[in-house]
Amino acid sequence: MIRFERPVTELIRVRRSWRSFVEDPVPADEKDRIQAFISGLDASPFGSRVRFAVVEADRSRGKRPQGTYGVVTGASTFLVGILTPAEKGFEDFGYLFEATVLFITSLGLGTCWMGGTFDRSLFSGMTRLAGGEFVPAISPIGIPSEKRSLVDTAFIMTAGSRRRKTWEDIFFQDAFGNRLEKASAGPYGQSLEMVRLAPSASNKQPWRVVQKDGRFHFYLTRALGYRRFFSQADLQRIDMGIAMFHFAQSAREAGLAGTWEDFDPKISALPPRTEYVISWAT
């Protein structure tokens, strides 16, 4: 089981996306702790091959490291996620990458999920990819700057991460359209709230959960037209993996028994662009 030195619910609440960092390097002992965490990661829920590398980017041209199109300042250390394509590979990738991001958060370091604003070929070249592997996302690692750059501030203002969907928008009882009362979620209410607080690409929040017959069924509701802008990585499936990790880790830390299983309840009248992903059996 993945373990953090702080409660995962606390880490989820304090984590923020940072693109502005001081120029001091990440201490060597902190890098060693990140490497040790990566080496001890649990298997992914669907068994896909996911691995990570911690690399140093060239910052010889100034504060902005190469390969991030000027979005990141100050950082030189990056977490690079590497995936061998599989049926549920993107979900597994999101699950384990988020686990690592939250561990880095527990060290007091800043991170930022980057799925589109980076030079994929450059970072791929840093990691010696095996046949078939590719890089869906990366994250800078560093000491957050007290003052965000203008670019970073613009990202924060346009992301809308503080304007999250409500409980009623994303959690349902037995079928879509039937609101799940918080009391009906019982001890899993906190885990569902951690799903609601999960980060997502462009803050689209594509996850939906239906509680039915002792299970929590996870669905992906795609944003209209979003996929065509990111042809190499299915970012909304990665988002599902992030939500899955928040749910499972917070449930396990709370002492709740449960496991992931493929158990499509065949709910009729799904919303448009909605597909079943996985279920949590209590």
Image: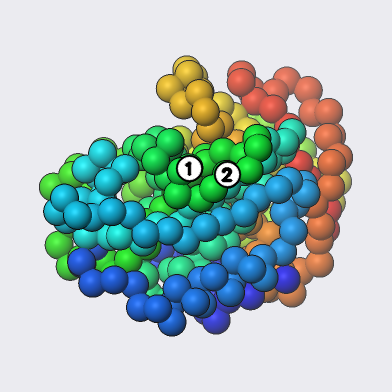
Q: Is residue 175 visible?
A: no
Compared with 182, 175 (above or below) is: above
Looking at the image, which residue is at 46% across and 43% down? 125
The answer to which image quadrant residue 274 occupies is top right
Q: Disc 1 marks which amino acid?
A: Ser
Looking at the image, which residue is at 77% across and 47% down? 46
Would residue 192 be found to the left or right of residue 123 on screen? right
Using the numbered discs, state the Cα–Cα distance from disc 2 to disc 1 in whole angstroms: 7 Å
> In terms of depth relative to the viewer, which is nearer, 64 or 175?
64
Looking at the image, which residue is at 43% across and 37% down? 120
Query: Where residue 105 sits: x, y (%)?
Result: 43, 69
Query: Where residue 195 sits: x, y (%)?
Result: 57, 52
Q: Residues within 10 Å of mark 2 (few under 14, many from 20)?
A: some
Q: Secondary structure at mark 1?
A: helix
Q: Is residue 144 visible?
A: yes
Q: Disc 2 marks which amino acid?
A: Leu
Specify the quadrant that holds the C terminus: bottom right
Query: Where residue 229 sits: x, y (%)?
Result: 43, 22
Would residue 29 be found to the left or right of residue 215 on screen? left
Q: Residues within 10 Å of mark 1 (few under 14, many from 20)?
A: some
> In terms of depth relative to the viewer, which is nearer, 181 or 77?
77
| Residue with the mark numbered 2 | 129
| Residue with the mark numbered 1 | 124
The answer to which image quadrant residue 28 occupies is bottom left
Per the rendering, the mark at residue 193 is none
> In terms of depth relative to the viewer, which is nearer, 235 or 10?
235
Compared with 129, 77 (above or below) is: below
**Cβ atoms at labels 2 and 1 below 8 Å apart:** yes
Specify the quadrant that holds the N terminus: bottom right
| Pointer 2 or 1: first along the chain | 1
Looking at the image, which residue is at 81% across and 61% down? 258
| Colouring scheme, one of rainbow, by chain, secondary structure, one colour | rainbow
